[in-house]
Image: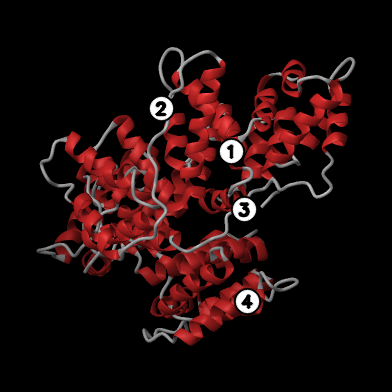
Amino acid sequence: VYRGSVKDFQGFDANQDAEALYNAMKGFGSDKEAILDLITSRSNKQRVEICQAYKSLYGKDLIADLKYELTGKFERLIVSLMRPPAYGDAKEIKDAISGIGTDEKCLIEILASRTNQEIHDLVAAYKDAYGRDLEADVVGDTSGHFKKMLVVLLQGAREEDDVVSEDLVEQDAKDLLEAGELKWGTDEAQFIYILGRRSRQHLRLVFDEYLKIAGKPIERSIRGELSGDFEKLMLAVVKCIRSKAEYFAERLYKAMKGLGTRDNTLIRIMVSRSEIDMLDIREVFRTKYDKSLYNMIKEDTSGEYKKALLKLCGGDDDAAGEFFPEAAQVAYRMWELSAVKVELRGTVQPAGDFNDDGDAQVLRKAMKGLGTDEGAIIEVLTKRSNAQRQQIIKAYKAHYGRDLMADLKSELSGSLAKLILGLMLTPAQYDAKQLRKAVEGAGTDESVLIEIMATRNNQEIRAINEAYQEGRAQEGQGSTQVLGTEHPVQGPSRAQAKFCLWKLADVSSNDSSDSLETRFLSILCTRSYPHLRRVFQEFVKMTNHDVEHAIKKRMSGDVRDAFVAIVRSVKNKPAFFADKLYKSMKGAGTDERTLTRIMISRSEIDLFNIRGEFIDLFDKSLHHMIEKDTSGDYRKALLALCGGED
């Protein structure tokens, strides 16, 4: 199935188009609208024929005339469209390695994503256009393992056999693990050989096997074992093996997000993928970033440049409101990965040489007399488990006849006080307090209710209920159960999963929203996590829809947000919290309440895993973002809980 956004123009006449372009550039000024309408609606093969016809009719070079008549980004885009794909890639690489410095990102993008045939065509086009050997030029401009991997890719010799040996898959996964995680230092040659030569189908299975035996995705190991441009290249190779559409969607998003636009990247991808997989890229973009590629281009560019890019994009997926097979495949792969058992690890462990009485003395000394030694308080309380902190509270009372919580509250202030006091409560007491704050007073903080209710397990929910009731009883109010929904712990049955699937899958029916919400409620809030993961897999396979997409399409408000939170928590709870942490710090200002709550509540459960998901999702470490976005003793305490720089 053709997945490009630009197709052959029906009724094509090269001479007629050449004449139209000549008239658009004749005389004073040029008709840019006519130029972009014609060129963006012809395939590359047809544009090449137009160039030949233009030369025959007028004895002039069409590309030279276009360069003369047009300017800026619009000129670069239109001229790029006129080159055959291999010559376009050759021009991009020539520009990347010419002059002072090298555009490594351009080299990585092209060489990591092209097929064997596309690489062979590129090498030949480079030789024809510039009279030079591409490999020799790349070798002369790069170094180290980065250079070695580029040379391997330039051979265009990746295996293309669809027959996969299970034994070789297991061996390659084991070899990669032993070359990195299990080795003192790293055997880069093993990474280069396997990732540079094996077939795409084979490597996808190797990545799945690696996750099973290493307990982490191959991307995370590459980030830990490799560095610099070599690391970026290997990550790009892995991403392209998994899904080229997802790789290019991410590159396009990064080209436009934030201040300024990386126009060279935007132009290169929009041109090079317009006749290959632009529809797939659009679909993944819409799913991954909750907005269409069309709308992001529309918001980030202007003038004829914008009009031409939107023509290449080929449509607005926000308007269509659809979900497509490529996005479904990406979602399904994520479900499969989420089903693999990964050990959850906190960043705060019980202190090995713990002495509750000694810690109580350190804390008393830190708060005695004029001033407060916040550093000492942070050092003790962020390096002890919650159970050990409860022992310190008792030792402090026994030794000094004082309430440690009251003293900390008196001596500390602001964000640090909220963080330290939160650490001193038991997990259930802390969650109960957060829920109480969320519902008392004017208005309700639904986001806090949703976060806690959607992510806690049965035992945690029971403990929160008890803590909530105890708190109300101490205040002289009647006991109330704040949470009641529980997920059973049994594993998934395929028959049960399919029964649930059919209850969920009929999202196109004319049921009332109440009926639909009841149907989702009966499944999402009662089935076990393993069972729901199986349901989600079946849902994607049988409907080409993601459950999350179906919820967003048919529901709204707090109900939608709650169900989406449950789905994301079921799929990958560390990734759910990584996303919330990122949103709490991105942009102007910091949502310290969310930041504090998650850092406290996950520090002994899965904060180490959250760190890994954070860097996978956002290409920056949680440690770095906290360091950049907070300050003072509050920052010191958060970084201590974070537990390290990734």
Q: Measured along the vertical axis of the image, is residue 521 above or below residue 596?
A: below
Where residue 349 sits in the image (x, y, percent)?
A: 71, 48
Look at the image and tell me in which quarter the N terminus lies: bottom left
Name the kind of residue labelled 2 in the image: Glu
Q: Residue at x 52, y 81 (%)?
A: 170
> Of helix, strand and loop, which one carries label 3?
loop
Residue beneath disc 3: 345
Q: Secondary structure at mark 2?
A: helix
Q: Can residue 283 be seen in this snapshot?
A: yes
Spatial distance from mark 2 to mark 4, Cα to Cα? 53 Å
- Using residue 390 as the reference point, say whether residue 42 is left or right of it: left
Q: Earlier in the sequence, mark 3 or mark 2?
A: 3
Image coordinates for residue 503, horizontal then vertical, percent:
20, 51
C-alpha span from label 4 to label 1:
45 Å
10 Å crowding of disc 2: few (<14), some (14-19), many (20+)? some
Kindly report which numbered mark, 2 or 4, lies closer to the viewer in this rendering. 2
* Picture quadrant of residue 385: top right
Q: Which mark is residue 148?
A: 4
Determine which of the numbered discs, if any, sits on residue 601 in the image.
Answer: 1
Neighbour class for label 4 at 10 Å: few (<14), some, many (≥20)?
A: some
Query: Does the CB distance between marks 4 and 1 fall below 8 Å?
Result: no
Q: CA distance from mark 3 to mark 2?
A: 28 Å
Q: Earlier in the sequence, mark 3 or mark 1?
A: 3
Q: Residue at x 43, y 24 (%)?
A: 480
Q: Which residue is mark 2?
A: 446
Residue 443 quadrant: top left
Position in image of residue 282 (x %, y %) = 31, 53
Q: CA distance from mark 3 to mark 1?
A: 13 Å
Disc 3 to disc 2: CB gap under 8 Å: no
User: Is residue 79 among the parts visible in the rendering?
Assistant: no
